[in-house]
Image (spheres, helix red, strand yellow):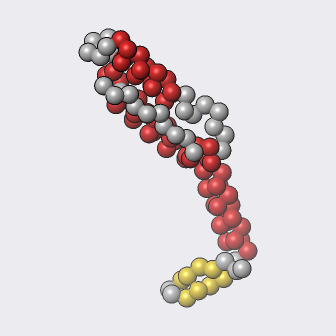
Amino acid sequence: MTLKKIINNIEIDLTPEEILFRQAEEAAWNAGAFDRAMASLRAKRNALLKDSDYTVLADSVLTAVKKSEWMTYRTALRNLTQGLTTVEQVNAVVFPVQPKN
C-alpha cells in the first residue's frame, strides 16, 4: 500500500523521506499512548478526590463510621494507578463506588 497526500485535490504518492517522517510521527504518538491514558485516569481520579475532600475534614458533620468509609474510598482512589503498565490495564480500571452520605 502506497501512502498518499492530497495537494490541490490531486492524490500524490509520498516520497520515501515523507514516509519515514510519517512513520516516525506515528511511532512517537503510539509511544505516548500509555502516558496519555495515565494522565486521563489521574485527572478523573483527582477530580473525584477533590470532590470528596470535605468528607475527611476535621469539621465534617459526618459520623466516624461514614468518615471511615470515605477514607477507605479515597485510599482506593489513590491506589488506582499502582501497578499499571499497559494502556489496556489503564483502560480496564474500575473506579471504586462512592459511599452514601
**Residue pictured at 66% horizontal, 77% vertical:** 3
| Residue 38 in the image: above or below residue 24 | above
Question: In front here: 45 or 32?
Answer: 45
Is the residue 56 above or below the residue 48 in the image? Answer: above
Give x and y (percent) for residue 12. 62, 85
Q: Residue at x 45, y 39 (%)?
A: 43
User: Image height check: is 47 above or below 36?
Assistant: above
> Which residue, as the protein is rendered here, is positioned at the far bottom?
10
Quadrant that contains the N terminus = bottom right
Q: Residue at x 55, y 82 (%)?
A: 6
- Residue 44's image quarter? top left
User: Relative to residue 95, is residue 54 drawn left or right?
Assistant: left
- Judge by depth and name the residue closer to the eye, 77 or 97: 97
Q: Residue 9, percent across and down?
A: 51, 87
Q: Is residue 35 visible?
A: no
Q: Position of residue 48 (x, y in %)?
A: 40, 33
| Picture quadrant of residue 11 | bottom right
Q: Quadrant of the C terminus?
A: top left
Q: Is residue 40 above or below residue 50?
A: below
User: What residue sits 69% from the left and 71% below the top?
Assistant: 19
